[in-house]
Structures are given as C-alpha cells and as structure tokens.
Image (cartoon, rainbow, N blue to C red):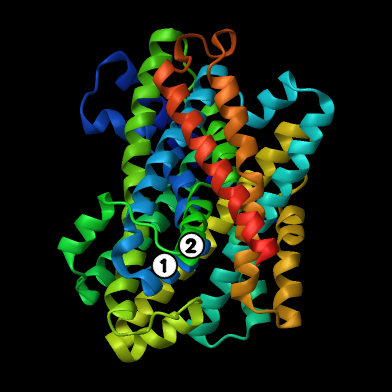
Amino acid sequence: MGHTNPLAIEKAQVTENRTVTAARDALSGKVKGFRALLPFLGPAFIASIAYIDPGNFATNIQSGASFGYKMLWVIILANLMAMLLQNMSAKLGIATGKSLPEICREHMPKWLTYAMWVVSELAAMATDLAEFLGATLALNLLCGIPMLVATIITGIVTYLILMLEKYGFRPLEKFIAAFAVLVGLCYLVETIISKPDMALVAYHSVVPWLGNNDSIMLAVGVIGATVMPHAIYLHSSLTQNRIVPRNDTEKIKIQKYSTKEIFIAMTLAGFVNLAMMYMAASVFHTSGKSDIADLTTAYHTLTPLLGSAAAGVFLISLLASGISSSVVGTMAGQVIMQGFVGFSIPVWIRRIVTMMPTVIIVACGVDPTKTLIISQVILSIVLPFPILALIYFTQKKELMGILTNKRITTILSSLCAILILGLNIWLVIQTFTG
C-alpha cells in the first residue's frame, strides 16, 4: 500500500545525512551551544507524545474538576519518574545499539520473552484504544462527523503520517514534534483564558495531598496515564541507530545531548499535563462542576463558562494529541513485535488490527469514558514489566559498558518501580472489588 516517490526519498536521505554530519560536528566540538543540540532533537519528542495522549486528558480533567489544584503534585512526581525512565531507555539504545525488546529476547528465557510480548501487545492495543477514541471524539465534536466515520478518518490519517518513516527518521520526528508544540500552544492559550490561581498552582505542585479513596484512585490513574509502557520500549529503539557512536567518548557525549533533549521534551509534556489539571480546577471545580468525568461533558461545559474559542482550542489539542499519539503507539507496536519475536507485519495491517477494538466499541455504542478507564487499568497491570527489565539491563556492566547506571540511578528507578507496582496492585484490587 502507498506509492513511494524516489525523488522524495533521495531528498530525505540528504536531510538525514545532513543531520548525521551536524551531529558529528557537535561531537567533535566544531559546533557548540544550542546549535550542537539541534541534530539530537527528535527521539524524546516522539516519546513525549505518549505522555500527553487522550488518556491524560481524561484523568487530569477529572482530577482537576473533582479536587481542584490539590492533585498537581502527582503530575510533577509522575513527570520526574518519566524523565528518569525515558533517560534510561534512551541510554540503553545508545550503549547497546539495540532496543529493550531485542535485549529481552537475547537475554531472557524464550517463554518469558513470549509472555512479555503478549502483555506488551495488549498494552499497545489498550493505549491505541485511548488515543483513537480521543481523536475520534475530537473530530465528532469539532466537525460533527459521526463517530464511526471519524474513527475511519483517524485510521487513514495516522496511516498516512506513518508513511513518513519511508523518508528516514527526520520527517517523522519533525512532524511529531510539531504536534507536541501545537498541544503545548493550545494549553498556553487555555492558561491565558482560564486565569488559574498561580499561587495555588505553585503550592500544590510541590505539597503532596491525598484525601479519600477516590483521590487515591485518580492519583494512580494520573501516574498510569503518564508513565507509559510502550514509550519505554520505543525510546530505546529511537536512539539505537540514529547517531551511531564510534567510541566510548562519543557514547557519553550522545547520552548528554539525549538527556538535555529529554529534559526539554518532558518539561513541555509536564506543562501540558499541569495545564490540563489547573484549567479544570480553575474552570470546573471553582464553579461547582466537580462531577465532570468525561471529555464530552468537559467540552460542553467549557463553552458556556469560557466561550466557544476555549472549547474549540480544547478540541484542537485533543485531536492533535489523539492523532500523534496513535502514530507513536503504532510505531511502538512495531518495535515490540520486531524486538520480542523477531518479525514484523506491514504497518497498514497493524493499523487495521489495532483500530478494530475502537471500531467495535464505537459501532456498539459503548461509553468511551468507561473504555478509557479499562484501558488505563490494562496499562497499569503491564507497566511494571518494562520498568523492571529496564532497571535489570541498564545496571549490567557487560551490556552497558561506559553507560552503566550509577548506583543512585538504580536506587531511584527501583523506588519508582516499587511505588508504581504498589499503586497498580491497589488500583487493580479497587477496580475489581469496588
């Protein structure tokens, strides 16, 4: 499927070679400052899209509407954990030239590799469900397109964007980064319109608060919607062959540039998540509308409270988030299959297979919000697997060489794993026992 333009591929190859040459100049010290960082920008922006997907919209808006500004600290905590884990994943790709699923296949028993592949594919499909539903809902509310038709349009658009991979790593990186910036700009506009109380934003961003069972449930949901299993798998793949280090010195330098890029991209994602929650706190919670639990209600409530412009910007951000995160989810699915079991399927087949659950749900008229919650529970169950594998492999000297985890990195990431595992067990028990 899809026609390839040889001239376009040739031009893309020139751009890619230019990026690699610019990276080599930075590594040799010929170029310094922000210009030196530019050729290394891309992988973290692709991964960061997973942190601002429609699942985040749902949990952040519900938290802000229900508890005001009090849950903002959860976003800061989740974002710091995400920065650490994404940095470790990127480092694994740079150090080994392999993705996390490939390393798992090489160093784990066959039965465990296949088990991890199955649960990781489930996670990728659960993620895609949330992303697809978000984009479909945005198209439905923004343009009045019927849900089923909107689902098919979303599928076609994401497939066409995925076709950019034919033209090398740079076009897709630029496209996804543009989507991330667009979502960020939308929330900058929402911040100006909603006029949140910045003193309360600053206070509750650093002072922890946990109230009743509902707030704990939402806190787990926020972390589950923020730290994503497929993004951890994907990041190691995005750095593995991008700029190939020729020696240990280059590995260290590439890793330093990667860390800076992760800080920039994840700070942007963190701002978007904070803005989602404090907008809901400022607009919904303060006006007594604390029962808003789904995206459709949020949109319809925004219109009378802040006007159609704010509601429109909200939908544009949801559409950009849904489409771009669905692209990233499909990319992660390819990496997971290729790495764990050593074969891949054409991207159009994967696109059709992963969108089928959404088509069935929409066609049957199932409540999208309930589906989003179920998808987050599935993600919560799967998340510990890639984190534990990542910690195990990145502290192995024979595998990582010069980029082996420092002791403090292993301790902090282990604490993240314990916290996430504990919260996820609690969430699953609460979900199934009520």
Give the class, few, some or many, for how many residues have Cα within 10 Å of label 1's Cα (few <14, many ≥20): many
The answer to whether 255 appears left or right of 234 in the picture is left
Q: Percent from the top left, x then y, of residue 323?
A: 53, 63
Name which residue lies at 48% across and 25% down: 91
Q: Percent from the top left, x then y, of residue 6?
A: 60, 44
The three-letter code of the residue at mark 1 reads Ser
Quarter of the picture containing the C terminus is: bottom right
Q: Would you say residue 43 is visible in this rendering?
A: yes
**Residue projecting furthest to the front:** 212
Quarter of the picture containing the N terminus is: bottom right
Q: Which mark is residue 63?
A: 1
Name which residue lies at 45% across and 8% down: 247
Towards the viewer: 92 or 165 = 92
Towards the viewer: 234 or 120 = 120
Name which residue lies at 62% across and 36% down: 386
The three-letter code of the residue at mark 2 reads Leu
Q: Would you say residue 159 is visible in this rendering?
A: no
Towards the viewer: 212 or 120 = 212
Q: Is residue 157 above or below residue 39?
A: below
Q: Quarter of the image holding residue 70?
A: bottom left
Contact between marks 1 and 2 (CB within 8 A): the answer is: yes
Give the class, few, some or many, for how many residues have Cα within 10 Å of label 2's Cα (few <14, many ≥20): many
Name which residue lies at 28% across and 71% down: 190
The CA distance from mark 1 to mark 2 is: 6 Å
**Residue projecting furthest to the left:** 199
Which structural element holds mark 2?
A: helix
How many numbered circles does the render carry? Answer: 2
Disc with the residue nearer the chain's start (1 vs 2): 1
For disc 2, the marked residue is 218
Which structural element holds mark 1?
A: helix
**Residue projecting furthest to the right:** 111
